[in-house]
Amino acid sequence: MSKIKRIVALVDGEHYPPVIKSALRKIEEENSDDRIVGLIFVGGIEKIAYSYPEELAGYPAKVASNLSGSLMELLDTFGADVVIDLSDEPVLGYSERMQIASSCLRQGVLYRGADFCFEPIRFEDVSKKPSLSIIGTGKRVGKTAVSAYTARAYKGMGDRICVVAMGRGGPHEPQMVDGDLVNINEEYLLRLSRSGLHASSDYLEDALVSRVKTVGCWRCGGGMAGAPFVSNVVDGVRLADEQDVDFLIFEGSGSCIPPVSSSATVCVVSALQNPQYVLGYFGTYRLLISDAVVVTMCEDEIISRQDLSDLCHGIKRVSSSLKITHTIFRPAPLEPISGKSVVYVTTAVPGANRVLTEYLEVNYGCKVIFISNNLSNRARLREDLSHSIMDCDLILTELKAAAVDVVTEEAVANGKEVVYCDNIPVSISGDVDMDDLIQYLHDLALSRA
């Protein structure tokens, strides 16, 4: 027998109450197996005398003082399963409805109106081990770097870690690699690439730089709130759960969220993104389901202090309880590069090239002769390498995008050494620093698990 759904209707003062009553009757007729349990007044005064009635058509009516916290509290009060929106502009416009959709999905409530329907993401409860989801508000915001750093930190605390990473180029069947046991070098990666596999998949980068167990998964398509259209992540988590490990890390892909329950969640946000992608649309939802935020790309050369402050104040307005750290990334070669002339291949934006050049030369004793920011653009990357590869001793590259099938192949073909590098998130400001933040998330995950 199917569960009777509890329906809450959103109503406004721009509709005459008799019109709303007629609409409610229509809902009852079309949803005879379910029941309306209450109304939430969301604003508008044109067609009401003084204030909205506390009861309409036999249903209790409550006023939502705002479209986030207040609305979510009322949905809990009513025990809502479904929200039906009977409001309209000018009370609820596009942006307001996205706020409502985010709040509904955060509460696991379906939200629908005349021509739209947003369903909550179904998070499968696969593992009982402590776990952390690392999600993001887009591609190239630094999720893998944050994931790898976190995995190393927890490993250093004595935990046995397994990272489950999903990607658009992940393996068809969940694939496990033990970074402590497998020598992930250029020969290993070229063998994978030449066999037709994506040898720069995130799970390989995690295994290479963190030396922990990782499971690679694939996904295709992504919904507005972050659900993958199809993926094998659930099977990947089952595989990880079978391992002799203490703690699991679930790494998202682009703006896609791992479709599995976790003990805690951190959202990675780029300071260079359009603020609306973070604070509006379903960026709001991603913030609402998170416990902390890592803001990346906070370089003085590419983001003003005022813009960064505005972004973080906006994040706090969505959820004041979120702990935030502001970070920059710094490259960390995995092998010595001292005394070498280096071509550095990265996904970093060109505005950071000067500071990255200085950092590598001062800290690693090399000479950076060229930086290519086109690691994710194969045509431009090949052009960059054709102009610079013969003048260098080695190529330093992040392990992502075209790092193997283009960069490593070109290095081998031209007799050049290739060195892979990590990206270290370094805190520069915020509520807490990076190390304190991931300790907080670790403790939170253990307490919830």
Image (tube, rainbow, N blue to C red):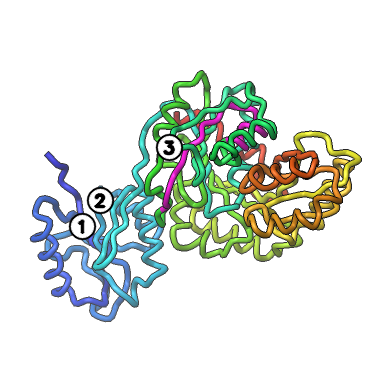
Q: Nearer the viewer, mark 2 or mark 3?
A: 3
* Residue picked out by circle 3: 233
Where is mark 2, residue-wise? Answer: 80
Q: Quadrant of residue 297?
A: bottom right
**Label 2 Cα neighbours within 10 Å, binned few <14 / some 14-19 / many ≥20:** many
Residue at 56%, 41% (x, y): give it.
198
Query: What numbered label is drawn on residue 38?
Result: 1
Q: Is residue 245 left or right of residue 88?
A: right
Q: Amino acid at mark 3?
A: Val
Q: Is residue 344 left or right of residue 439?
A: right
Q: Quadrant of residue 38?
A: bottom left
Marks 2 and 1 sit apart, C-alpha to C-alpha, by: 9 Å
Q: Which residues are magenta?
A: 204-222
Whole-number angstrom distance, CA of label 3 to CA of label 1: 38 Å
SS type, badge 2 = loop
- Residue at 62% across, 27% down: 179
